Image: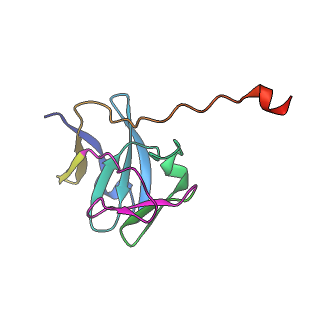
Amino acid sequence: MAWKRICGADEVPENTARKFDVDGIPILLVNYGEGYRAIPPICPHMEEPLEESGVIVRCVLTCTKHLWSWDLRTLEMKGETEKPLKVYDVKQEGGSILANIEEELAYEFDEPEEEDDDFFK
């Protein structure tokens, strides 16, 4: 296990998210009021940066770009969400938030379809 300090527990207010760089790995730390989640900083749907588009209300993280959402207590996908969040194990120790980071967690995205220029000819 490689437990690494992300930040102080007081650096991310309740119901907010903040992006950190931990040894070159980008991590979004989310304080959902009942605990913390450390996740990749982009939405698994279309690579939207969650530090800009993520909203936390009643322990649910929602990406406002396409309304995908997850219950941060259970990690259950809500509504029309089709991909789960990837998460790092997190613990609070001595006023700090630590994450177990073995490697960078990343989502796989579909390649954009190439436009068919013949369609408009």
Left/right placement of residue 115 relative to residue 31 reads: right
Q: Residue furthest left?
A: 1
Q: Main secondary structure of the magenta part?
A: loop
- Quarter assignment of residue 27: top left
Of 17 and 114, the residue lying toward us? 114
Q: Position of residue 79 (x, y in %)?
A: 44, 66
**What residue appears at the point 47 percent right and 36 percent down from the top-left corner?**
109
Q: Which residues are magenta?
A: 65-88
Left/right placement of residue 80 relative to residue 14 reads: right
Q: Position of residue 57 (x, y in %)?
A: 43, 70
**What residue appears at the point 59 percent right and 33 percent down from the top-left corner?**
112
Left/right placement of residue 11 relative to residue 93 reads: right
Task: Check if residue 107 falls in the magenta segment.
Answer: no
Of 5 and 50, the residue lying toward us? 50
Q: Point out the image quarter for the C terminus.
A: top right
Above or below, comparing residue 107 to residue 60 in the picture? above
Q: Position of residue 75 (x, y in %)?
A: 29, 58
**What residue appears at the point 38 percent right and 73 percent down from the top-left corner?**
58
Of 23 and 85, the residue lying toward us? 85
Left/right placement of residue 25 relative to residue 94 reads: right
Q: Position of residue 8 (x, y in %)?
A: 30, 50
- Quarter assignment of residue 5: top left
Above or below, comparing residue 66 to residue 108 in the picture? below
Task: Check if residue 72 falls in the magenta segment.
Answer: yes
